[in-house]
Amino acid sequence: MHTVPPCKYGTWRLGPMRNTTRFAEPARFREGLYTLHGGAHAWMVPNGAWGETNLGVIIGDGTSVLIDTCWDPALMQEVMSHIAPAIANAPIEIVINTHADGDHCWGNQLFHDKQIIGSDACIAQMKHYHPRSLSALKNAGKLLRHIPFAGINCFGHYMSEMFAPYDFSKVCITLPTHGFQEKKLLRIGNTELIIFNVGPGHTDGDSLVYLPQEKVVYAGDILFADCTPVMWSGPVGNLIKALETLRHLDANVIVPGHGRLANNRDVTAAIQYWQFAEDQLYRCYQQNMTPFDAARSVLHSPQFLSSPFAHWDSPERILTNAYGLYREWGARLTNLPEKLNVMNILRQQAMLAFSVPTATPKIMRHRLGWAQTH
Ligand SMILES: [Zn+2]
């Protein structure tokens, strides 16, 4: 039986006794609530792939703060029932959303009567995401995986596996009640929280939540640990600047949006990933390669394969990153309407995923023979 390795930066307190992830991978760390320092806690979800989102829990004297919610209300409810004994004397009164991606705010409805905080840019973007379109895509994926044409079967398989652990049908978008522009200070008992909006980068508004006395930062999706980062909004220069801001805070423990507990070495690795992606993809751009050919060429290059990034989850995300960078460099890529364009990028990302069958999560990139018999 697989034994989950212990964690260096925090102490596991409680959680479910699973040793595999939602995508049937061996867990690289234990799921559950970790004490980091004083009242600073994190709910960690192995291994940090799609929707395996980490949350922050700051347990104060009589009041607690939750940082981010899950991708669906049922998962959020499950976390709440696990942490109930830990917050029995300090119920959650404030929720902070680091950014607008559904896997960080679609459990908000459980806190509809509480104060919810997000940057103005995050709130504006949240209004544009619709759970119904993901439910439709989840259902369509089950059919599309049987169409062996133009990578549609890869796309169908990839999307249906990505969404299989989640139920978007009950999600009711619940927006933050309190916005801010750049910086917001909060005090919960003796704990001081500073929220910085360092976006746009990963999304339009990306917040870091910094606890200066505890030397802990909740980084949202500005940082991924052992998982390939994604840039939906850009520009990359601002994303690197955000990582430099994070590094400058010099925290002892960083809770990334996805992946294990981290520190400044992981921030440096993330900066190196973006610099590497930018350099390698720009070379391809200058050779008039399409974003798909560029991403495929980088992913299979000796430079990439000998880098630490080759061992990170979901390496195919370089395709989305290539599209973002090409846009920054002024490439005219498509005349497709925005939603179809996103679908097209994900179709290509799925095709790329199938070209690296050894990468994790494995279930999303099985050979099609496997997909067709399931
Ligand atoms: Zn996320």
Image: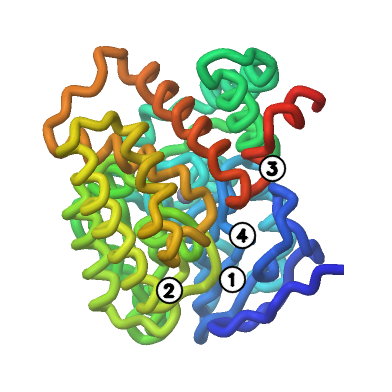
Examine the rendered structure and indicate whether residue 243 appears above or below residue 228: below
Residue 225 percent coordinates (x, y): 47, 65
Q: Amino acid at mark 2?
A: Ile
Are circles 4 and 1 on residues that touch, CB within 8 Å?
no
Give SS at disc 2: strand
Residue visible at 42% across and 50% down in the picture = 116
- Quarter holding the C terminus is top right
As measured in the structure, the alpha-carbon distance from the residue carrying label 3 to the one carrying label 1 is 40 Å
- Residue matched to label 1: 90
Outermost residue to the front: 302
Examine the rendered structure and indicate whether residue 106 appears above or below residue 280: above
- Disc marking residue 363: 3
Q: Nearer the viewer, mark 4 or mark 1?
A: 4
- Disc marking residue 254: 2
**Left or right of residue 353: residue 25:** right
Q: Earlier in the sequence, mark 4 or mark 3?
A: 4
Q: Nearer the viewer, mark 4 or mark 2?
A: 4
Mark 3 closeness class: few <14, some 14–19, many ≥20 residues within 10 Å: some
As measured in the structure, the alpha-carbon distance from the residue carrying label 4 to the one carrying label 1 is 29 Å
Are circles 3 and 1 on residues that touch, CB within 8 Å?
no
Residue 214 percent coordinates (x, y): 41, 85
Q: Quadrant of residue 365?
A: top right
Ligand 1 within 8 A of label 1's CB?
no
